[in-house]
Amino acid sequence: MTAASRPSPSRVPSSRSLMYVLMMFVVSATLLSMTMLDISPFMNEHLPKYHIRAETVASTGIKTKSRGILICLFDAMIPMTVSLIQELRTLGYTDVIQLYHCNGELSSISERMLHDVDSNIEIVDGCVEMQALGKLRHQDVNGYRSFWLKPLALVHTRLDEVILMDADDLVFQNPSRLFDVPGYIFNPYSNNDMQSMTDPEERAKQLLDQVPAFVSKRRTRSKALNKAEDDTDPLGFWPQECLVNRGSEPMRPQDVAAIRVRIKNAVAAAVTQQRLMQHAS
């Protein structure tokens, strides 16, 4: 019986070498599977539901005309939004209502309440979808949880004609009639003739007549906020938005003059803008 010869120590693979070989095999198998498998369905799963209007038209060649109301909101605004939707439907408004929020500002409960009250709505996380489209950086997303969500929503919406409303707006007539009123039409994405001001002088006069003569003495902020002074007021925060039990004082002459100059300049700029857009069309 002869003893089997043992291999020399230099020819025995070490455990470290075996580990390297195993790692290379795993990496190679992974790369091979990625090149051979079609993973596009999984990649497309979280792509945005809506797209920027201009890019959609450019890619499909199809230009449709759609109308709707757009409201920006978050969880605390759900009661006002629900009541506004109900009021709009009662007044006969039938088009879609888009509800924009930013980076998960609406809870699942809020979304369920909105869907329960109306079926012809679209809830859109504009910030997340703009980020997915590469139009918004991650570090800038939460900065649009403010007034700036409104212009973002106008850029992002799939609608061609939009009425932008606040959740606390009071509506007394069906707002859809505004889509056909020349004085309110301004939509560079549609084939309008851009005659949004049929009589600039009359429009300027209307605006100048609306310049207030008195303002609230306690009106020190631009929007309603709950603060200590409001908690003791049975009327809540509404006095911040009107002159109920708050007193008033005359506007300073220099402020009135500045507002009037601003109105005249704005009307003149609007006339120039319309003329330039007419020549370009």
Image (cartoon, rainbow, N blue to C red):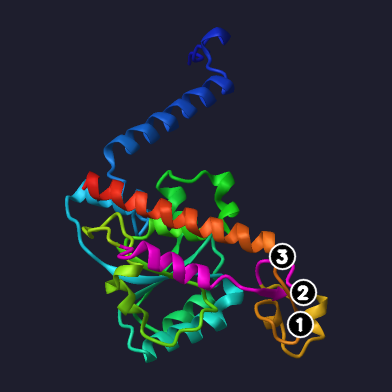
Asked whether, in this view, residue 253 is left or right of residue 93, the answer is right
From mark 3 to mark 1, how far is it between C-alphas? 18 Å
Q: Disc 1 or 2, which lies upstream in sequence?
A: 2
Location of mark 3 (residue)? 252
113 to 99, vertically: above or below: below
Under mark 1, the amino acid is Arg
Location of mark 1 (residue)? 246
Q: Residue farthest to the left?
A: 61
Magenta residue check for 66 = no
**Residue drawn at (26%, 51%), measured in percent from left and top?**
56
Asked whether, in this view, residue 267 is left or right of residue 231, the answer is left
Q: Disc 3 or 2, which lies upstream in sequence?
A: 2
**Residue drawn at (31%, 59%), measured in percent from left and top?**
187
258 to 113, vertically: above or below: above
Location of mark 2 (residue)? 217
Q: Are marks 3 and 2 in contact (CB under 8 Å)?
A: no
Helix, strand, or loop for circle 3? Answer: loop
Q: Residues within 10 Å of mark 3 (few under 14, many from 20)?
A: few
Asked whether, in this view, residue 71 is left or right of residue 161, the answer is right
Between disc 3 and disc 1, the foreground one is 3
Q: Residues within 10 Å of mark 1 (few under 14, many from 20)?
A: few
From mark 3 to mark 2, how far is it between C-alphas? 12 Å
Q: Disc 3 or 1, which lies upstream in sequence?
A: 1
Asked whether, in this view, residue 215 is left or right of residue 170, the answer is right
